[in-house]
Amino acid sequence: MGRILIKNARIVNEKSVFVGSLLICGDTIVDIIPKGKSLPPTVDYTVDARYMYLFPGIIDDHVHFREPGLTHKATMASESAAAAADGITTIFDMPNTIPPTTSINHLQDKYDIAAENCLVNHSFYFGATGNNLHLIENLDPGSVCGVKVFMGSSTGDMLLDDKELLIRLFKTSPVPIAAHCEDSSIINANLAKYKTLLQGEEPDITCHPLIRSAEACYRSSALAIELAHQTDARLHILHVSTAKELELFQDSPPDDKLITAEVSPAHLMFHQDYYKTLGSRIKCNPAIKSKDDREALRNSLKSNKIDVVGTDHAPHLLNEKIGGSISAASGMPILPYSLPSLLELHSLGYISLTEIVQKMCHNPAIIFNIEKRGFIRKGYKADLVLVQEKEEVKTVSSSDITNLCGWTPFEGMKFKWSVQQTWVNGNRIYNDGEISKKHKGEKITFVR
Ligand code: DOR
Ligand code: ZN
């Protein structure tokens, strides 16, 4: 498109909101022009962004795009389109695919699939197992976002909870370690208790947060943090789901600490009472907990205890979500409603627009050392999102869902905010309901 001007937007960036215009040349932001200053006399294309807010593109550090091996649930093509419709311009995908991303060849296969199909920028976590730590030690820190360790078992059987192996991993990983924390011994003991109580019958979905309990989360997160302190590891705790875990985190910006934390929209939007209406649709690991937990997580958005909002988009088909605490699949599709969810929380007073940008754009870039993205700055990549608060409230309907799995836990919820446009590397890939598939995203590089 050449030289593009996004004109008169309310730019939200680096703790400030101001009206201005942005000049993009090719894939790069070349000028940020505050209102009142003269605009370039000639450009190839102008976007009138009056009434819209302009954010840096969202960097989602946590998705499960299911490819390879689980393409009946989702594909890189289908889910990256949903990401684009959610204002997400970069995704980091999890390793619990089939085969799991636990070898260099399997990692390369994912990059090859993404180069052909992924509409947004991307990187892939390498999955830690008991016997691939030598591969992790030799990962290229410039090209892999991080290592994922399941310190609690979940979809995909990738549990690693041997303390000696964890210490070795924490000591030697050249990239950040992203941890799923739920203590398996506590979960198994709770499960055994319920099986005895119910004489072998499956506990129903309301038991899920009692089996995968708050204590299981706290114990495992506390252990991960203890090991990270011992080893000086760069640790990122994923999907914090309880009030008690918040006690474990330092209230300071991510550049000042080695241990950071992520929260997911599911734990911010739902609580235990929703099992009555949504049943196992909202079954996920860690489980959706009490209303008090949700309130504590919401209130933590204003602090630096929670550094990142990552979606944990984990689609399954509805027929895989049938059953109770054991048999229903864990995980739910979040895209394309993560940014609208956070914007609704903004309207409710839980988070400011600059804090949304901090936790969804700036902090992921800082924590993972992403090169030239995550901020609106001259010389940075033109990854951008335009959002708008509408007059009329929109009710989410399953007929709007283009994801392969065909459903959303947000069905029936009302959103005032909508994502209007998403720009990736200077290309507009989402515009008011329309996806453009002409351009593919890039492999992310890291400065470490
Ligand atoms: O609920 C979950 N679903 N938790 C996980 O850890 C994995 C995810 C999935 O892949 O479905
Ligand atoms: Zn996940």
Image (cartoon, rainbow, N blue to C red):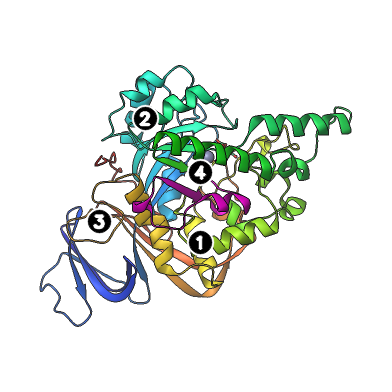
Mark 3 element type: loop
Instruction: First in sequence, mark 3 or 2: give its number.
Output: 2
Looking at the rendered image, the quarter that the C terminus falls into is top left
Of tags 2 and 4, which is closer to the observer? 2
Gap between marks 2 and 4, in whole Å?
A: 17 Å
Position of residue 97 measured from the top left corner of the image (x, y, whole percent): 49, 28
The kind of residue tagged 3 is: Ala
Instruction: First in sequence, mark 2 or 1: give its number.
Output: 2
Q: Is residue 248 visible?
A: yes
Position of residue 137 measured from the top left corner of the image (x, y, whole percent): 34, 24
Mark 2 element type: loop
**Residue 19 sits in quarter:** bottom left
Q: Residue drawn at (75%, 42%), measured in percent from left and top? A: 210
Gap between marks 3 and 4, in whole Å?
A: 28 Å
Q: Residue drawn at (61%, 60%), measured in percent from left and top? A: 296
In screen coordinates, is 294 left or right of 432?
right
Q: Nearer the viewer, residue 237 or 68?
A: 237
Mark 1 element type: loop
Residue contact at pointers 3 and 2, CB within 8 angstroms: no
Position of residue 205 measured from the top left corner of the image (x, y, whole percent): 76, 42
In screen coordinates, is 168 left or right of 362?
right
The kind of residue tagged 1 is: Leu
Residue farthest along the left direction in this orientation: 41
Instruction: First in sequence, mark 4 or 1: give its number.
Output: 4
Q: Is residue 95 magenta?
A: no
Looking at the rendered image, the quarter that the N terminus falls into is bottom left
Q: Which mark is residue 238?
A: 4
Residue tagged 1: 301
Residue farthest along the top direction in this orientation: 131
Q: Is residue 83 above or below residue 34?
A: above
The kind of residue tagged 2 is: Ser
Residue contact at pointers 3 and 4, CB within 8 angstroms: no
